[in-house]
Amino acid sequence: MPGDYKTLKQAASDEFIVNKSRFIGYASPCQSEEEALAFLKSIREKHRDATHNCYAYVIGENAGVMRYSDDGEPGGTAGMPMMDVLKARQVVNCCVVVTRYFGGILLGAGGLVRAYSHGCVLAINAAQVVKMHLSKRLLLDVPYPLWDRVNHALKSLPVLTEDTQFGASVEATLLVRVSDLEEVAQKLTAVTDAKAEWLPLGELHYPWPEEAEQEA
């Protein structure tokens, strides 16, 4: 499974007007090229009367698939500048479409590059860039006499507690970044005198909140 990567949190849009031309930037996270094409199709259908629907998308944690289109604008003035923005922001598994309604005033090549780049930036900012950290989900089984110590330790550790069940013992479902796993394991082993049991529940990419990232 690949390591950490940046992508978009949600589908979103933003727009602006320059020299009477209306530009609407749309961005969405996409896990496959099929999802990216479906997102593009939905925007095209929504704006069938638009002058242009230019796009750029990057698929794969290692940016294995990269596609873009000027959709009728002069070559190199729309799709490529949008792709340059995606590369600069280092976001993958996402698609951006910038729709244009021509306002009657020509912008020139430089003006088009700036407009489509700006539309892409606005869309990405609206969708919010998040960092997906390779993480492990763990089930921690703790005897009741040790739970207070464990609970106190968890508050200062770079973990997310997803669920806590109180049965014959306390079972806490934790999410831990792979990069923090050794630190967390050592600390919890120490506070429980190695009496807590661990059960791995799987590995996944998870968008950790910024405050958790800063605490690590």
Image: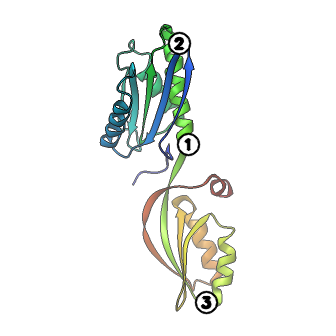
Q: Nearer the viewer, mark 2 or mark 3?
A: 2
What's the residue type where badge 2 is placed?
Answer: Gly
Find disc 1 in the rendering and name its residue: 128
The answer to whether the residues at label 3 and label 1 have Cβ atoms under 8 Å apart is no
Vertical comparison of 59 with 181: above or below: above
Across and down, in percent, residue 128 comes to 55, 42
How packed mark 2 is, by other alpha carbons closer than 10 Å (few <14, some 14-19, many 20 or more), is some
Q: Is residue 130 left or right of residue 158?
A: left
Q: Dot 3: few (<14), some (14–19), or many (≥20) neighbours within 10 Å? A: some
For image coordinates 53% across by 12% down, the residue present is: 111
Secondary structure, mark 1, is: loop
Q: CA distance from mark 1 to mark 2?
A: 26 Å
Earlier in the chain: of badge 1 and badge 2, it is 2
Residue 63 x/y as whole percent: 40, 38
Residue 190, percent across and down?
A: 64, 78
Mark 3 lies on residue: 144
* Mark sitting earlier along the chain (2/3): 2
Q: Quadrant of the N terminus?
A: bottom left
Q: Quadrant of residue 213?
A: bottom right
Q: Is residue 97 above or below residue 115?
A: below
Task: Estimate the spatial distance between the alpha carbons at disc 2 and disc 3, rounded to whole Å.
Answer: 66 Å
